[in-house]
Image: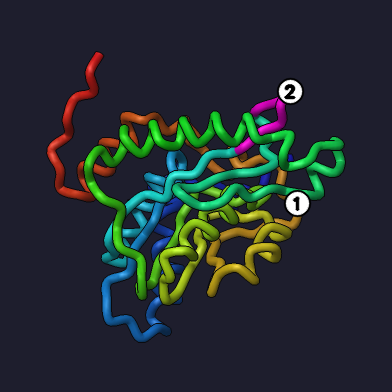
Amino acid sequence: MWPPEEERFADRTTAGRMLGSAVAAHLRQLDMTHAPLVLALPRGGVPVGFAVAEAIRADFDLMIARKIGLPWQSDHGVGAIAENGPPVFDRSALACVGLSTSDLAPAVQRERVELRRRQERYRGSRPAAEVTGRVVVIVDDGLATGVTARAAIRALQTGKPAHIVFAAPVCAAESVDLLAGDVNAVIDIHSPREFHALGLYYSDFTPVTDADVTDICAMAWGAVKVPTPV
């Protein structure tokens, strides 16, 4: 089922600008002594997060997360890891398929390897942004099951930020309810109760590539892009 035309975004950048206005309205209620920090979830959340960071005049960085899939269907996410945080699992989904968290240990290890690869590809030697005592906004291009968002939030919490916001242009209403207890605010433009597929909410949902991510990071950080060796 397609969402109504008025609930569809032209592309991720347009969605990010709209989301940035909503995030800015929330931040105006806070007493901040430092610039806020946007942490975008690669890959799809990066163009959205960059637009949000521009809109709220925030520092920009990444929160790299990886989905953990079923052994026989890797694209079906039942867990996630983010940066150096612990794995987070959808335990009800695991129970439905008769798996325990230990059954997914090989998948967790594989995704940690890929996570480190992306850290090196995107950041290189650049250290991660300091989060202690700051207002931090985690941004993605959408929130479906919420398991990746929860992994990112758990990883972020270890750094003791002062205020955590999760923001995405479209969020499944059920997942918003699940995240509400883990963050100070969840901000979205649309939160449908019937959430079918994230791509339906974008007219242009072209996959974001590693090259796209590094280009955006170079713009955000004022860096000179270093060509990737062939």
The mark found on residue 83 in the picture is: none
Is 92 on the left-hand or right-hand side of 142? Answer: right
**Label 2 neighbour load within 10 Å: few <14, some 14-19, many 20+:** few
| Residue 176 found in image quarter | bottom right
Is 222 on the left-hand or right-hand side of 189? Answer: left
Q: Which residues are magenta?
A: 68-74
Instruction: Give the percent coordinates (x, y) of residue 172.
Output: 67, 54
Is 41 on the left-hand or right-hand side of 218? Answer: right
Q: Is 228 situated above or below 187?
A: above
The answer to whether residue 229 is visible is yes
Labels in figure, total: 2
Q: CA distance from mark 1 to mark 2?
A: 27 Å
The mark found on residue 194 in the picture is: 1
- What's the residue type where badge 1 is placed? Glu
Q: Is 112 situated above or below 144?
A: above
Mark 1 vs mark 2: give the one in front: 2
Instruction: Give the percent coordinates (x, y) of residue 160.
Output: 43, 70
Q: Nearer the viewer, residue 72 or 207?
A: 72
Mark 2 lies on a secondary structure that is loop
User: Residue at 39% across / 55% down in the picture?
Assistant: 39
Most common secondary structure along the magenta stretch: strand
**What residue did someone put label 2 on?**
72
